Amino acid sequence: MRRLHQDDEVSVSCWTHTGLAVIDGMPLIVVALDLANPIVREARTWRELAERDDLTGLYRRNVAVSVIDDWIAAGDEVMVMFADVDHFKQVNDGYGHAAGDAVLSAIADRLHALSHDDRIVCRYAGDEFLIASRPSVWPHRGFVWQFDEQRYLHDYIAAAAEAATHPLGIDGHERVSISTGEARRRPADSAATLIHRADTAMYRNKAHRVRER
């Protein structure tokens, strides 16, 4: 492996292959360069495109499911929360699909900031978002301090719904709202069963919110 410097001072990695050949009785030294950097960069770009949702830039469902599977396999505590935009069809019908996309993008922009090594956010489907996390625990002088992940996410998602109202320029009863549901990992859970319980909890919450209107 060698590194070459281009005229624009950008370094390029390449494999150098050398060999000896005889053509028409003349000995020749053959040198072949196989550029590696452009291939690696292109592979990373295509992987990023495959993993990210086109509209929101959040991870796609399959990436989040894979991460949850890995956390469960490692024996970690895992919490999954679903967030679903209420009455999203009415937004599309009343303001147009461009407005609907603006709402989803505004929510996604806020949710994206939640991502870190112990939390992943994805656009699960349509107007549904999924947040999976490994709740943080800190031992301190004989006490165990646990971050209230559930309450924090509830408050943060409520703020995301508030931010999503602005692209539409609406208020009052038409303000964007989000229903949520969460589930914590049980010993026998897989990613699929954990996600299913969170999804079921979200629909219960949505039904309750509809009755309160």
Image (spheres, rainbow, N blue to C red):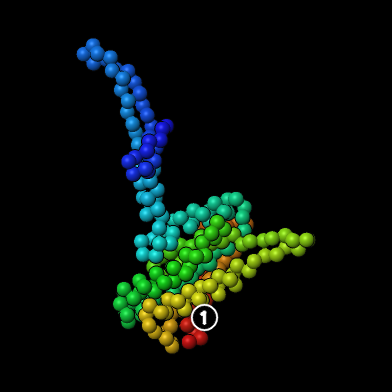
> Relative to residue 194, is residue 92 depicted above or below?
below
Residue 110 is situated, as x and y percent measured from the top left of the image, at 47, 69
> Residue at 61% of width from left, 55% of height from top?
76
Residue 141 horizontal side relative to residue 153, left or right: right
> Relative to residue 24, is residue 101 depicted above or below?
below
Residue 87 is situated, as x and y percent measured from the top left of the image, at 41, 78
Residue kind at label 1, given as amino acid type: His
Q: Residue at label 1? A: 208
Residue 137 is situated, as x and y percent measured from the top left of the image, at 67, 61
Q: Nearer the viewer, residue 116 or 125?
A: 116
> Relative to residue 5, is residue 166 depicted above or below?
below
> Residue at 40% of width from left, 58% of height from top?
52
Q: Nearer the viewer, residue 198 or 10?
A: 10
> Relative to residue 97, is residue 28 depicted above or below?
above
> Residue at 74% of width from left, 61% of height from top?
140
How dense is the environment of label 1, judged by Cα within 10 Å: few (below 14), some, or many (20 and up)? few
Q: Secondary structure at mark 1?
A: helix
Residue 189 is situated, as x and y percent measured from the top left of the image, at 57, 57
Q: Nearer the viewer, residue 5 or 103?
A: 5
Task: In the displayed orientation, state which residue is furthest to the top.
Answer: 25
Total count of labels? 1
Residue 109 horizontal side relative to residue 38, left or right: right
Taking the image as drawn, is residue 130 in sight? Answer: no
Q: Nearer the viewer, residue 7 or 38?
A: 7
Q: Classify the position of the N terminus by image quarter.
A: top left
Taking the image as drawn, is residue 23 in sight? Answer: yes
> Residue at 34% of width from left, 21% of height from top?
19
